[in-house]
Amino acid sequence: MIDQTVDLIIICLGLALTPLLFFRFPHLPAAGRGEYPSISVIIPARNEAANLPLILGDLKNQTVTPLEVICVDDDSTDETAAAAAACGASVISLSDKPKGWTGKSWACQNGAKEARGTLLLFLDADVRLGPVALARVAKAYADETVTLSVQPFHETGSLSEQCSMIFNFIQVAASGTTLPHFDCRGLHGPLILIPQAVYWQIGGHASVRQSLIEDVDLGRRLKQCGHSFCLFVGDDAVRYRMYAGGLKSLFQGWVKNMAAGAAAVPAPLFVAVFFWLSSLISVPLQIVRFATDALLPLYIVLYLLWVLILFCLASKLVRVSVWTVIFYPLVMAVTLAIFTVSLCKNLFRLPVMWKGRSITKEEHP
């Protein structure tokens, strides 16, 4: 009886935390009119020959034209540099990454050194932009006049990509993006707009050169230097498709980020996310446990309630099928497996694989 009571308390607590953790979904403002500061777009790219024509094509169709587009080829083994040049981008080719730097931070730093714009816009190669995306980003900057970052809406294709569903929820909640107040914890790596003067004042990506979660630590660095920033969630104007390479790329990507990201979350918020996830996990476990018990109908109702909640959250953050939401315990199993591996690699400082490169323990804290 005590176990049942504890389980129900955890489940109810998780449900009660949902409107707090996902209180709001701040979107970029509508595109405005007028003059905006010049924007240098910087795309760090390693083995992105397939994605670059898409994002570079989107940039050519913007209603606000960037001053320049710089693609930094991070020692790719495919035709990344050729694809970028063919689409009209300025190309910087890097090799022999210095020890103590992660590849993305090294690429971003080198791109920023060549940029001439007042604002630096760092974009991941897998981001897709609607025609008014830069206009909306520029309007957001004009309104706030601080660094801003966007977590793109996650487009998915294969079933394996939809295994990111829970991670998408964790990302926005743990970063503070969807909390009731702007108490942001770090930036979102796929899209970061920062004034060039501020970027160099905080030391650029050199200040986070060893970090596996350079976006989170760059936000922390901004706060340390007295600068604020704003976070947004994407929609049709700002979206991306991560891990189109299948389950292997999804596994490597989230293993690289999850445990390190969790360690950066403040304790109260970490506890809230923990109980939210515990509630999600507990309900299907209790259905199995009480399969022939009088409590079964209660847990079925709670399960359906969670399915409804997840479906509503997914509609704002990630494109998944109805069946993925209905069978969310399978997604939770993948999530827990990835987090466990990520935690072990961080605790024992084991190498992490990403984009065909092994990031050894000497290269990250």
Image: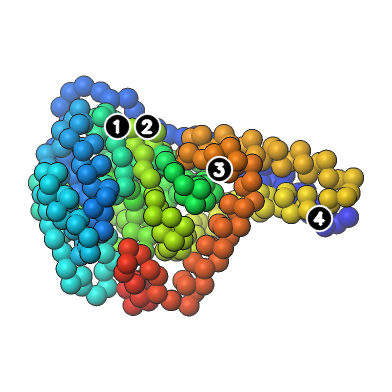
Query: Helix, strand or loop at disc 2?
Result: loop
Q: Is residue 197 visible?
A: no
Query: Helix, strand or loop at disc 1?
Result: loop
CB under 8 Å between discs 1 and 4 = no
Q: Is residue 334 above or below residue 319?
A: below
Query: Helix, strand or loop at disc 4?
Result: helix
Work out which quarter of the rendered image holds the C terminus and state it.
bottom left
Dot 2 corresponds to which residue?
A: 236
Q: Is residue 358 left or right of residue 45?
A: right
Q: Residue at x 15, y 64 (%)?
A: 94
CB under 8 Å between discs 2 and 1 = yes
CA gap, disc 2 and disc 1: 7 Å
CA gap, disc 4 and disc 2: 42 Å
Sooner in the amino-acid sequence: mark 1 or mark 4: 1
CA gap, disc 3 and disc 1: 28 Å
Q: Residue at x 77, y 41 (%)?
A: 300
Amino acid type at mark 3: Leu
Q: Is residue 54 above or below residue 263?
A: above
Q: Residue at x 26, y 28 (%)?
A: 132
Q: Position of residue 11 (x, y in %)?
A: 72, 47
CA gap, disc 1 and disc 4: 48 Å
Q: Position of residue 302 (x, y in %)?
A: 74, 41
Instruction: Give the number of the disc on residue 73.
Output: none
CA gap, disc 3 and disc 4: 29 Å
Instruction: Give the number of the disc on residue 289.
Output: 4
Amino acid type at mark 2: Asp
Q: Quadrant of residue 69?
A: top left
Work out which quarter of the rendered image holds the N terminus and state it.
bottom right
Dot 1 corresponds to which residue?
A: 130
Q: Is residue 63 above or below residue 340?
A: above
Quick one: 80 or 193, which is closer to the camera?
80
Dot 3 corresponds to which residue?
A: 21
